[in-house]
Image: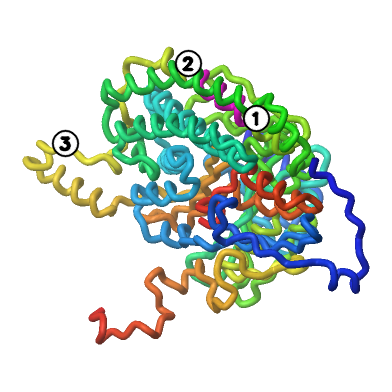
Amino acid sequence: MSAEVHTLVSEKIKTLLPEAIIHDELAYNFPVFEIKHEFIHQVLAFLKNDTDLNFHFLTDLTGIQTPDEKKLGVVYHLHNMPKNYRVRIKTFFDIAKPELPTATDIWPAANWMERETYDFFGIKFKGHPNLKRILNVDEMDIFPLRKEFPLEDQTRDDKEDKMFGR
Amino acid sequence: MSKQINIEPTPQEEEKEYSTLNLGPTHPATHGIFQNVLKMDGEIIHEATPTVGYIHRAFEKLAERRPYGQITPITDRLNYCSAPINNMGWEMTVEKLYGVKLPKRVEYMRIIIMELSRISDHLICNSVIGVDTGAMTGFLYIFQWREKIYDIYESICGGRLTSNIGRIGGFERDWSPKTWELIQSFVKEYPKALKEFAGLLERNRIFMDRTINCGPISAEMALEYSFTGPNLRAAGVDYDVRIASPYSSYEDFDFIVPVGTSGDTYDRFMVRQEEMWQSLKIIEQALKNMPKEGGFRADVPDFYLPPKEQVYNQMEALIYHFKIVMGETDAPKGEVYHCVEGGNGELGFYLVSDGGRTPYRLHFRRPCFIYYQAYPEMVKGSMLSDAIITMSSMNVIAGELDA
């Protein structure tokens, strides 16, 4: 089942945009596609609107950072409920220019998920209607899920070592 | 009931007419830390702006520093009304990463616990709809049955609300005869109580008048907003993870997926009511077909301490004991998405492992967080009191919403 979805989706994307796919695999029985970030909006809109594939349901949207801390990524999990197709779309871009077109025009549910991703990774979704922090306080000036901020709070200046003996 | 005709005022009138009301963050009617800034025209809601994140506890960041076994207690605190489903969903995710195959008996035991927690989740939600519409009796009466479910958890793992039940690969130890007895007696006696509870509300004229057409959502809109679980099914879409992509041997069981038609508060209530009956049916089947053989766990040496007599006498076993306790066992490299049917929707775990002792990245797909964003649209144009029962019927859990 997943293997069929994998070949079907990859053929469809290849006929539409031959250079869009960087890498594709079947990981743990789940079709995964890495798409160039320039084409991401086009590919997502195609996956939703294509009559055969019709990924009408956005299951999940989240951010990720590469281990070398040079790139950020966004991971989409799409679902076609009647046919039970699932697919994972990943895209990576430079951390210095963390911008990506929004998916809210394709799936309204992306609204809060993109806000959450912005909140934790600082990815700016262009065209988002209300891109501001959602779970953290508005005054926060870091993006906490990036790897440059380890769990021990490095940004505090009220905690003196001589007082607490750390 | 809740359909009101709204006449759009001009901007000047708007300045004059509307009043702002802060509903929450702590309000007895919201059952959790939710804030909604409401723009009110008399008693009619013109616009709602939810603010979330009051109890955000950075679970995804915490998980990046914790060994796999120690993430289970974090998942308890997501949807704390059905903690075992979260625990087991997480355990199954890690088992998928490791490629562990569980004995049938363990899977059936898990199903019993997951269905019990589904009952306890729906039971709280439904009785609280009763409270918000002014019927306290059902809530007080049915709540003792949640206590009985918690007694079952307690006899298995010691925990009640935040259960931390099970281990990666099965259970910590085999269930005692007392546990089986408690489950048997629950399955035998609960239908009577549920019937009485249903008699109080299901065909109650006042309750029906109050909830029918209150906070409705169409199937198209529910799908656009990525609704899952009972809320989606109440709108008329028969999507259930247990059927669509079965996990933990759900394919062996015979049950139906109840659906509603209009997606209003009454439909959501009725879908949950019927799901409780279906859960009972599943538990009965699991008890009947429970395999005798299979033990209580799979062979996953990374997460089970070696027997004590070996630890004291063998070097190797001592090393493993130490490694497991310190959480120093490395996981395989991989990227997994696993979803289970939680109390209020598709609960997903997106796990990226780079081969270390902790996840490289862990994301929880929390159904509440995703469907709560449709709330402003659902309550627009309705009365304040309808907004309250719409929220309680959506089963929004603050812990899951804010992670």
SS at mark 2 in the image = helix
Marks 3, 1: nearer the viewer:
1
Q: Mark 2 lies on which chain?
A: B
Q: Earlier in the sequence, mark 1 or mark 2?
A: 1
In the rendered image, which quarter is residue B183 located in?
Answer: top left
| Point 55% across, 68% down: residue | A136
Q: Which of marks 1 and 2 is in front?
A: 1
* First reached walking from the N terminus: tag 2 or tag 3: 2
Amino acid identity at mark 1: Val
Q: What stretch is highlighted in magenta?
A: B272-281
> Measured along the vertical axis of the image, is residue B232 above or below residue B112?
below
* Residue under pointer 2: B285
Camera-nearest residue between B221 and B316:
B221
Query: Does residue B93 appear in the picture of this structure?
Result: no
Alpha carbon separation for disc pair 2 and 3: 34 Å
Q: Are marks 1 and 2 in contact (CB under 8 Å)?
A: no
Residue at 45% x, 27% y: name it.
B111
Quarter residue B277 falls in: top right
Asked whether B279 falls inside the magenta stretch, the response is yes
Near-viewer residue (B14 or B170): B14
Query: How many neighbours does mark 2 have within 10 angstroms: few (below 14), some (14-19), or many (20 or more)?
Result: some
The alpha-carbon separation of the residues under discs 1 and 2 comes to: 21 Å
- The residue closer to the viewer here, B229 or B269, is B269
Q: Which chain carries label 1?
A: B
